[in-house]
Structure formats: structure tokens, C-alpha cells
Image (tube, rainbow, N blue to C red):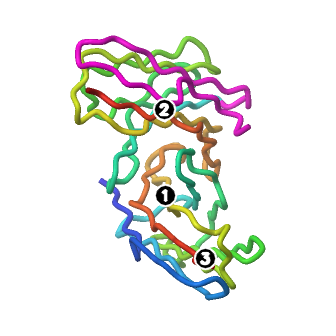
């Protein structure tokens, strides 16, 4: 139990499908993040939410749509994805301020066919 | 854009050997963190260093933050097979609240029995 729960763990979707990834934390953290992890690349920051307000969108294509209804829940809505979007999508949470580490979920392994 | 370069990218050693992994940047960081990631899981925080020149020890792992806060190293003494994993360094920029992390590409460590 890492404290950050992501569902589903694995997802296979067609390019015309619509799906959502879910992330939940009950650690009392006020910041939540979506990262993309692809082979041979550093983790890429996608979105940052602080006290459920989006504070960063790292030039992510509009086919990825985040939603943060409260400080404990974060969603990533997916539609009309491309095969190159296949990756491990990681959710993390933290307190804000210098020196606070992230708590990551186990990730969703996404395959776009 | 802040970049973190890790070296080596891959390291395969025998149980009982010592090793050092490096994390370098031209940017100054307010803090630097090390994570370990196992296959199919999210990264897990090992340590956070905040002060230039700081040294932290975690059992057989020794972490050092460079005096100028631009680089860090991770030294493992008497490696064990359980140390196998992807080691990631991540830095928090001075210009942000300290929460947004930039990750290196990682060092894949394999410890053979």
C-alpha cells in the first residue's frame, strides 16, 4: 500500500475509444501530478494540481484532459489517442514546499492499438 | 529547461561490490531527491537532500548533495540482489515553490547473485 491508488493497472484501448484513469490519495497532500513514463525517456510532467486548481499544463495535447474534483482525487480522461501515447502513466501526490518528496501510485500501463 | 543527467545509464555488478551513481546538472536546485523504481511499480522515495554539501546515510546507501547544489551522488556499499532497480534522481527548481520535480533518465542497476 503506497498511499496513492491508481486504477486501472492495465488498459488497452483503441484509437477511437474514450477512457479515464483514476488516482486517489488520502495522505493529506495538497498537490497532485500526472507523469508519463516511456522507455528510454525521463519521466515527463503532464499536469500539476495544487489545492485542486491546475497550476501547470506542460504542453500536453488536448486528447489528454485532467480533472481534479477535490484534493484527494485526480482523473485523466483519454480520447482519440495515438499509438505513441502508449506508456506508463503515473500519478503522484505531495505537500508543497521545499524538500517534500512525492508519493507515487503504481501506475496505469496504457496500450493504444 | 532544467536537465538532469544520470550516469551510468546501466550498471551490472556482482553481489558484494560497491557502486556509485551520479546525477549532474548545470542548474541549481533547491532540493534533490532519489527514488528507486521496480518493474511494474511507481518510484519510491529514498531520500531528500536540501543543503549544499549534505550527506545522508540510509543503511548501505550514502547520498551526497554537491556544494553548489547542482549535482548529487548515490553510493551503495556491498550491493545485494534486492538493490536491483531503476534509480532516479529528481531536482526541485529554485524558481518554483519547490514542488515541481525534474527527473533524470535513471540508472538501471542489476545486482547478480
Q: Chain of mark 1?
A: B
Residue A65, quarter of the rendered image: top left
- Identify the chain of the residue marked 3, using the numbered disc in the image: B
Compared with residue A66, is residue B70 higher up or lower down, i.e. above or below? below
Q: Secondary structure at mark 1?
A: strand
Reading the image, the residue beneath label 3 is B64
- Secondary structure under the numbered disc 3 in the rendered image: strand
Residue ID for mark 1: B91
Q: Chain of mark 2?
A: A
Which residue, given by chain and number where applicable, does mark 2 sit on?
A: A108
Q: Is residue A36 left or right of residue B40?
A: left
Q: CA distance from mark 1 to mark 3?
A: 13 Å
Vertical order, B31 against B17 (above or below): above
* Circle 2 or circle 3, nearest the eye: 2
Residue A107 image point, x, y percent: 52, 36
Residue found at x 54% / y 27%: A50
Secondary element at image label 2: strand
On screen, B113 above or below B34? Answer: below
At x 52% / y 34%, what residue is drawn?
A: A91
- Residue B58 coordinates in the image, percent (x, y): 75, 70
Question: Which residue extends farthest right?
Answer: B59
How far across and down, in percent of the image, does residue A23 sit?
57, 24
Q: Residue at x 30, y 12 (%)?
A: A17
Horizontally, residue B97 falls left or right of residue B80, namely left
| First to last magenta residue range | A1-29
Q: Nearer the viewer, residue A46 or B109?
A: B109
Q: Which numbered marker is on residue B47?
A: none
Amino acid at each position: 500500500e503506497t498511499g496513492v491508488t491508481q486504477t486501472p493497472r492495465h488498459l488497452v484501448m483503441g484509437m477511437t475509444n474514450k477512457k479515464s484513469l483514476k488516482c486517489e490519495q488520502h495522505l493529506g497532500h495538497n498537490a497532485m501530478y500526472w507523469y508519463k513514463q516511456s522507455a528510454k525517456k525521463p519521466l515527463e510532467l503532464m499536469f500539476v494540481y495544487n489545492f485542486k486548481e491546475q497550476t501547470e499544463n506542460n504542453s500536453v495535447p488536448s486528447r489528454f484532459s485532467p480533472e481534479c474534483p477535490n484534493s484527494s482525487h485526480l482523473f485523466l480522461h483519454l480520447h482519440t489517442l495515438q499509438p505513441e501515447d502508449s506508456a506508463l502513466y503515473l500519478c503522484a501526490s505531495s505537500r508543497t514546499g521545499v524538500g517534500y518528496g512525492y508519493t507515487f501510485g503504481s501506475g496505469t500501463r496504457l496500450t493504444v492499438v | 529547461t532544467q536537465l538532469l543527467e544520470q550516469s551510468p545509464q546501466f550498471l551490472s555488478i556482482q553481489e558484494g561490490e560497491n557502486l556509485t551513481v551520479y546525477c549532474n546538472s548545470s542548474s541549481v536546485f533547491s532540493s534533490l531527491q532519489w527514488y528507486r523504481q521496480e518493474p511494474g511499480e511507481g518510484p519510491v522515495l529514498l531520500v531528500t537532500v536540501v543543503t549544499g554539501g549534505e550527506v545522508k546515510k540510509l543503511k548501505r546507501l550514502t547520498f551526497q548533495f554537491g556544494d553548489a547544489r547542482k549535482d548529487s551522488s548515490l553510493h551503495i556499499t556491498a550491493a545485494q540482489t534486492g538493490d536491483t532497480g531503476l534509480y532516479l534522481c529528481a531536482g526541485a527548481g529554485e524558481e518554483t515553490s519547490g514542488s515541481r520535480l525534474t527527473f533524470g533518465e535513471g540508472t538501471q542497476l542489476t545486482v547478480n547473485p
